Amino acid sequence: MFTSGLDVEERSAAGSFRRRAVCFAAAALAGAALLSACSKEGEEAPAPGTAPAAPASDSATIKVGVLHSLSGTMSISEVAVKDATILAIEEINKAGGVLGKQITPVIEDGASDWPTFNEKARKLIQQDGVAVVFGGWTSASRKAMLPSFEELNGLLFYPVQYEGLEQSPNIFYTGAEPSQQIVPAIDYLLEQGKKRIYLLGSDYVFPRTANKIIKAQLAAKGGELAGEEYLPLGGTEVSTIISKIGAAKPDAVFNTLNGDSNVAFFKQFKDAGYTVDKMTVLSVSVAEEEVRGIGAENIAGHLVSWNYYQTTETPENKRFVDAYKAKYGAARVTDDPIEAGYFGVYLWKLAVEKAKSTEVAKVKQAASAGDIEYAAPGGLVRLDGKNQHTWKTVRIGQVRKDGLIQEVWSSGKPVQPDPYLTAYPWAKELVAK
Amino acid sequence: MNEVLLHAFNGLSLGSILLLISMGLAFSFGLMNVINMAHGEFIMAGAYTTYVVGQHLAPLVGGTDAGLWFLLALPASFLVAGVLGLLLELTIVRFLYGRPLDTLLATWGVGLVLQQAARSLFGASNVQVSSPSWLSGGVVLSGGVQLPYKRVFLIALVIACIVAVYTYLHRSAGGRRLRAVMQNRQMASCLGVRTRRVDAATFALGAGLAGVAGCALTQLGSIGPSLGTNYIVDAFMVVILGGLGRLPGTVVAALVIGVANTLLELSTTASLGKALVFALVIAFLQWRPTGLLALRTR
């Protein structure tokens, strides 16, 4: 019945169809990326001349922004951090709030798209008048938001480990910088007698910067670079890289892969015959949450470096893990960025209470004494007065068969943050660049 | 010697993966000219079907290790993705034949909807599918070189798919009708072939093949809502290089790209290797815009 209508249309288009289809497909692939960026541009931008909303502290509640990717590729990691931030806010509200006022979270979706992060950050500061924003994951999203926070004098708590060499006056960094994660991890490998290190990472800013630091460190400490390879972000074809690693015969692989590539790498690494006793992989972007996607049997025995594990033995952690599972389900796990997303809210609360105000300048002033500290699930954390990073305990862990991570080495006390690696003579060249 | 064998195997293996992900697209895009941006999401649907079968059916048929469930997951993935494809064809695509830009946007939108649906159903995190014990490990050659069973299995699966598709197209009544409609729609229609039904079946078949690819890929990569986006560009590249409307072209293109990518990556780096492959494909299409094995058209 309806064939006839269809055929009329087809007939008219039949002629040059094949060639056109090719063009359209090519345009499609390029266009898809553009469209996703454009469609979000300009949305929610405040009308020109609109005055920023009244300071949040004047009203009955205090508004705070929560800005993570709830959709798109990064939502794999960021949804859990948002959940932890919300948990902390609810706990604080239950205990009476901040300065006697309840906290109202304004949740925005960064959609794994860096311009969107910037748009939403501006919206939170200008339209909602939030006192602080908790959010971001990738360095790209932080770098996209940074100019807006500085221009509009907002305040950002950034919860993820990153490559260091940055210090914005409007950002508090609650994740580790290299001297709290990467540098001790390399030291640990060298102490274990693993001198020849192969560097494997995703092809973007964090792994490349991290590997620059590692290469300087290896050169200074008698280690040896066995090779260096980068996989396009999201790439899953790792067989050639595994062959190259096999040919280089390193003592250990230092892995800065991010996201889905880790799953492909560990599955295929094991199948290529590299069991953990033959070659150890130390990862810095694989936590409990990622282990679930990789499959514990594929990664058990390999090492990771973080500041917190679900198994970390503190009374605060037991309470935190119980509360998180009670709220979000027993199958959920906690990990380092989740913990940082959680205690960041408490650090901000302590700073606000000390300042007796949510004004950015006063909060920063309160934190500058360097005495804002909190008994976080992973042990004591303290905001550094000078560089606005966080004193954290460094822990090397080994992945267990049940998917949790067992600590095998710890710094024993919070390590002073040093984002520009000023304490390491071998890092001078890096910082100068 | 072993090194050479390993690299040849890697190239062949990458070619088989590329063929697996693009074979379905060779139907919807290659034969029907539908720029199907939701193809990646059909792959994802296949992967999640495998996950569900592994979670719920595996304990009933001998457990995860025995791996009977995985053999059941293959047809299940084909069916689920095929039904999704059929629904997409019946509700959206059939109104848009001959309008490539509109199908492009519509299927892309459907792809986003399917991604977010997976996120709501299964959560944003990656999920894990265990491997049957007979797919773990590999053939050990001397010199510590090991060819993973999973990749051997993938190559075998691809060959099985090629044989099945060839048999269907050239040895069955349905396949004959399909070829007739794709070659001359009016004539087929005049001779009593219900072209609408053939369209729907072809699109569903393409989606089903994507589902099989998704099932197989659970053994190699991640299983998450955005899984399909990792493969869609490669799939289009293979189909376009092979020449639209030519299934043998798709097979050759997949092997050529697989081997070229492996060799180029070996002598350079992963990112540069991939960029070089893209550059070579573009250069080749400048020279022969219709692809490797194109139909002669007037």
Image (cartoon, grey):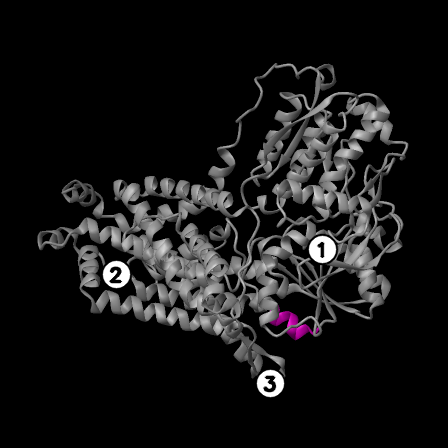
Q: With respect to residue A260, does A38 lie above or below? A: above
Evaluate if marks 1 and 3 touch, with contact meaning CB atoms under 8 Å apart.
Answer: no
The magenta segment? A242-249
Relative placement, left or right, of A419 versus B133 is right
Please tell me how crowded label 3 is: few (under 14), some (14-19), or many (20+) other residues with Cα within 10 Å: few
Q: Nearer the viewer, residue A404 or A184?
A: A404
**Amino acid beneath label 2:** Leu
The local secondary structure at tag 3 comes to helix
The local secondary structure at tag 1 comes to loop
Residue A142 placed where, x, y %?
68, 38
Whether residue A245 is in magenta: the answer is: yes
Q: Residue at x 77, y 46 (%)?
A: A317
Picture quadrant of residue A140: top right
Say which mark, if any, is on residue B201: none
Q: Residue at x 61, y 35 (%)?
A: A117
Residue topped by disc 3 = B142
**Amino acid beneath label 3:** Ser
Relative placement, left or right, of A358 versus B194 is right
- Indicate the chain on which mark 1 is placed: A
The local secondary structure at tag 2 comes to loop
Residue topped by disc 1 = A284
Evaluate if marks 2 and 1 touch, with contact meaning CB atoms under 8 Å apart.
Answer: no
